[in-house]
Image (spheres, rainbow, N blue to C red):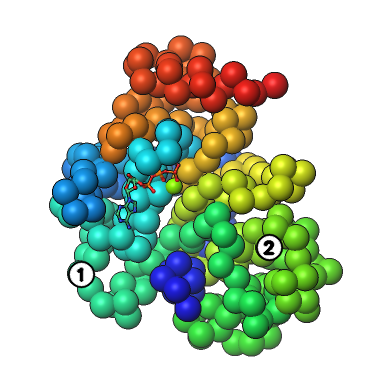
Amino acid sequence: MDSEQAANFQQGPVTDNQSQFSNAVEEEVIIRTVKLNKYFGDKHVLKDIDFEVHKREVVALIGPSGSGKSTLIRCLNALEKATSGEIYIHGERLNANLSVKQLSPMRRELGMVFQHFNLFPHMTVLQNVIEAPLLVRKMPKDQAVALGEKLLTKVGLSDKRDVYPSRLSGGQKQRVAIARALAMQPRALLFDEPTSALDPELVGEVLKVMKDLAYEGSTMVVVTHEMQFARDVSDRVIFMSDGSIVEQGDPEELFRRPKEKRTQAFLERVLSVLP
Ligand SMILES: Nc1ncnc2c1ncn2[C@@H]1O[C@H](COP(=O)(O)OP(=O)(O)OP(=O)(O)O)[C@@H](O)[C@H]1O
Ligand SMILES: [Mg+2]
């Protein structure tokens, strides 16, 4: 099991009590960082990042390659250890120095979905989804199976429950990975370029599942190059460049009238390829 698989394994989802009829952003803070800094050797990769995500908020994190987007969300889940600064998950301070076992309850609060799915190849789709609830949450088998089936239906894959990941397309694998993240009922979902490893014709099915989650009121942080998704689905867009948050705000406003030169230059580059 690699560290990303281990992180998924410890996750905890989006609960049933998130009403389908209200996705208004709430005051409650789910994720907060204070002056977060990260160095790799002498390379300063995150610079004084102050970042907040509220309940039911969908935050899109955009920016050029190497700007620190993945590092930021990996720090939130203690996959990377920040050099300085503070991280709070639902008010509780994350101490990345703790052992993997000690970190497990906090990691469970955030569900991670990575570019490369990281499914367990030797387990069926259903087993992938229910493994963590069974082992980590000690959920009774019948309850876990019922939850797994419900989540597979949600991501449109109920007919694939007994097949192995090698038999799935990339889009299907990623939808299983989303179901697996949801199965631990995390407070928020973190996506790191969930569609960028997919063939273009498979991107839409994954974005649709993410869109549904957003409209149901899930709390989400999405690192993405899908500008249309960022513009249409997110409540707030954060533009990062060179380890800093350069600008953030309402998606419509930020895309139409970016204030900072670096944001303008980036958007000109990426939006020129939009339809
Ligand atoms: N494990 C590591 N060791 C050393 N340097 C790293 C490591 N991980 C990331 N970096 C460096 O940190 C910087 C930020 O990387 P990061 O992966 O967070 O960027 P990103 O914004 O996610 O980029 P991309 O859009 O390409 O995914 C880059 O310069 C990268 O080379
Ligand atoms: Mg990245």
Looking at numbered disc 2 in the image, what kind of residue is underneath it?
Lys
In this picture, is 259 found above or below 89? Answer: above
Looking at numbered disc 1 in the image, what kind of residue is underneath it?
Asn
- Say which residue label 1 marks: 97
Q: Nearer the viewer, residue 143 or 162?
A: 162
Q: Is residue 11 visible?
A: no
Q: Is residue 83 visible?
A: yes
Image coordinates for residue 259, horizontal then vertical, percent: 37, 14
Image coordinates for residue 130, horizontal then vertical, percent: 61, 77
In this picture, residue 192 sits left or right of residue 261:
right
In this picture, is 217 found above or below 79? Answer: above
**Badge 1, how many Cα within 10 Å: few under 14, some, many 20+?**
few
Mark 1 or 2: the one toward you: 2
| SS at mark 1 in the image | loop
Q: What residue sits 26% from the left and 77% below the top? A: 99
In which quadrant of the rendered image does the C terminus lie?
A: top right
Image coordinates for residue 187, horizontal then vertical, percent: 45, 58
In this picture, residue 2 sits left or right of residue 202:
left
Based on the displayed image, in which of its 4 quarters is residue 77 positioned? Answer: bottom left
Disc sitting over residue 173 in the figure: 2
